[in-house]
Structures are given as structure tokens and as C-alpha cells.
Amino acid sequence: MTWKSLSESHRTIHIPSHLGFWRKLLAFTGPGFIVAVGYMDPGNWATDLAAGSQFNYSLLCVILISNVMAMLLQRLSLKLGIVTERDLAQACREHYSPYVSFVLWIFCELAIVACDLAEVIGSAIALNLLFHLPILWGVGITSLDTFALLFLQKRGFRYLEALVITLIGIIGICFGLEILFSHPSGIAIAAGFVPHLNVITHPDMLYIAIGILGATVMPHNLYLHSSIVQTRSYPLTQVGKKEAIRFASIDSNTALFLSMFINAAILIVAAATFFKAGRRDVVQIEDAYKLLTPMLGVTGASTLFGIALLAAGQNSTLTGTMAGQIVMEGFLNLKMKPWLRRLVTRSLAIVPTFIVVWIMGDRGMNQLLLASQVVLSMQLSFAVIPLVKFTNDPKHMGEFVNSRFMKAIAWTVAIMIAALNGWLLVLTAKSWVG
């Protein structure tokens, strides 16, 4: 027996066929924003801060390129879910041997734990900065969002989507205000979005650029998106699926564009505030929080930064635990009660965080955050390559199979991600040895 992906929410949102374009788009809107959360999580903040404070606006082009790659991969993911009526984990289990599927599941679980760990750390740091709560207390408090997720899903998937979109809106407003406070150069920002060779030839710039690329595309998002697009109830015909792909793609691209704005905003604020003042040593979230208000001369600038961080951390923990349920059910064909699944996932993230903070104190948080991003980089290709392979295969996709041009682009992106993340691991290993 194969379980329906995220069975408690599967096809629970009815899409009336008589709706006009805008009302139908609104009905399909939601999954893209849930996925976009992973592209603006606390794991991205440190690389964006370092990029802005050390290299001004130069690495905005890397954020743009990585976002375009993300749009492509998420479109392949939603397309797989809509066409095959399987999420990526289920497709892997049905296509590969039990041994390979089990190995892929282990890698994916490690990535989800690493991602969840980054969100726990981000939320704990935000609570510490805003309310002066000890980090250990903050780590414990973040476990409560497990119950919030259960409550919202019982009320209906649209309630969860509404919460996620609201938190994204809060993050966007906070950084929109930070940009106004920091008075960046519009001409310099525009120039920063233009790709240039210095990104490749400058070793330190290349290291941070690879870090941005490696932290942008989250492997669990590819499993997540292929599942949650199936929360919509549309005709399971060729016409119905074609329309679903169209609206789901608009939803996804719009949400990812907003995530690009937020990542770019973090970099822009760091450049306009820290680089401009010669403070190229600001690479930690805590340092940025403490310096924003005095350097900008605006009361509340640091508070807005902390609120945005807390919203990003809470948003990401909601989606990470949901992804954990999807991959366990998909790879193992094992149904576990949602509260138990989320408790297990959150425990696997909280326990190592508690241990590190207990032994190393607050200073160990940033090393743990870096380690989580390395684990994510290692796992990414194990999700990207099967996704590209399945969507390129007419046996899986039928008439919806990728065109020759799209196949070439998809494989190019997959190879590029594998190479860049491999190089990031080499550079990280050298930095640790050094």
C-alpha cells in the first residue's frame, strides 16, 4: 500500500473550475510560499551578511543566479508532484532498489535535521537578542512550534499557509525599513546584480559566493514542494494538470522572487551600513544586531532585525518538520502519527544544540550553524539528480516530460550545484584544518 503524500492534507483544497484567472491563482497560491521559507532561513543570513560587509554589493549577482536556479528546480519538483501524483520521495522508492532508497532516506533525514538545527539556532539567537533569554532557554522554547503546526494542520492547510505568508510579510517589511534606514546606492545595487569575473578570480569572494549558492537551494524543499502541491484538488486530466502546473509555477516564482528580495536586502543593508563604514569584520548575526542601531542612528533598527530573524526561524522550523514527515512516509512507506514524527525530528535537532551550548557556550552556535550548512551541501545532489532524472524520463512524465532544451539546462544546473558544493566542502575542510 502506498500512502498519499501528506495524507491528512491531500487534495483537501478544492479548486472550482468556473473561477477566473485571478481567483484561481489565489486558490493555488500557498505552496510556493511555504517552499520559499527555506530560501530565507537563518542559515543564509551569515553568508549574506559576510558578502555585504566584505565585498559591498558585488555578490548580489550570485543571489540572483542562485535564485534563478532555485526557480528551475522548484518548477521541476512541483511538476513531478502534479503529473505523477507522487512526491519525490515516493518516486525514489518506486524507482530505486530498497537499499538505494534507504540510503537516500538517511541522507535526506540528515539534511532535514541539519536544516532544522539551523532554524533552532536562529530562533534561539533571536530570542536571546530580543528578550535576553539564555540560549538554552531559547532552544527549548522553539520546540513549542511543533504543537502550533499540529494545531494549524488540524484546522486546515490554508491556515498554515496563511501563517507562513504572514511571517514572510513581517520579514519583508522589516528589511524594507532597514533598506530605507541605511540609504544604499541605487546605482551600486544595479551594478551588483550584473555578473562579473571578480567573483571567480578573487579567492575570498569565491568562497562566500559558493557559500551563498550552497545555502540557497535546500534539498528538503524539493521533496516538500512535490508533496504540498497535491493539497489542491483539481481534475486529474491532462488539461487539469497542465493548468495546475501553470498556476503552481506562478505561485512558486512569485514566492521565490520575494525570497530573493529578502536575501538581497540582508546583503544590501550590510553593505550600506558596515562596508561603507569600513567594518568588514561583521559576519555574525549577533554583531549585526548590536551594531545596526548605533551605526544607522535609528532607534529600533536592531529590533527590526531581531524580529525578522525570529520570524524566519519560526517559519523554517514549521516547514522543516513537515518535510520530515513527507520523506519518512515516502521513502519507507511508513505512516507515523504527525505529532510523533515532528517530535522525533525536533528532538534530533535540539539534542545536539543543547550539547554544544552546554559544552562550548554561546560561541559554539556559529560553528554548529556552519556545520549544518556543510551537511546540507553534501546532501543536495542526492535530491537534485533524481529529480532531474525523473522529470526527463517520458516513462514518468508522459507528454509533460522536459523538452530537450530544459533537459540540457536541468543537467547543467545539477552538475554545477554538485561541483560548487563539492568545492565548498574542500574549502571548508581547508579552513578547519588551517
Image: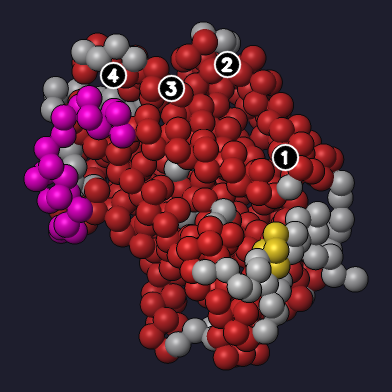
Q: Which amino acid does label 2 sit on?
A: Ile
Nearest the camera: 369 or 61? 61
Relative image position of residue 298 (x, y in whole percent)? 25, 14
Residue 195 seen anywhere in this rendered image of the structure? yes
CB contact under 8 Å: marks 2 and 1: no
The residue labelled by disc 2 is 135
The residue labelled by disc 4 is 292
Relative image position of residue 426 (x, y in whole percent)? 41, 51
> Label 2's element?
helix
Image quadrant holding the C terminus, namely top left
**Residue positioned 46% across, 29% down in the render:** 309
* C-alpha gap between disc 3 and disc 4: 11 Å
**Residue positioned 85% across, 70% down in the render:** 2
Give the side of residue 174 with respect to residue 14, left or right: left
The residue labelled by disc 3 is 306
Q: Which amino acid does label 1 sit on?
A: Leu
**Residue positioned 34% across, 15% down in the render:** 300
Q: Is 29 covered by the magenta stretch?
A: no
Which residue is the extreme one toward the top? 132
Which badge, 1 or 4, comes first in the chain's sequence? 1
Which badge, 2 or 3, comes first in the chain's sequence? 2
Q: Which amino acid does label 3 sit on?
A: Gly
Q: What residue type is labelled 4?
A: Leu
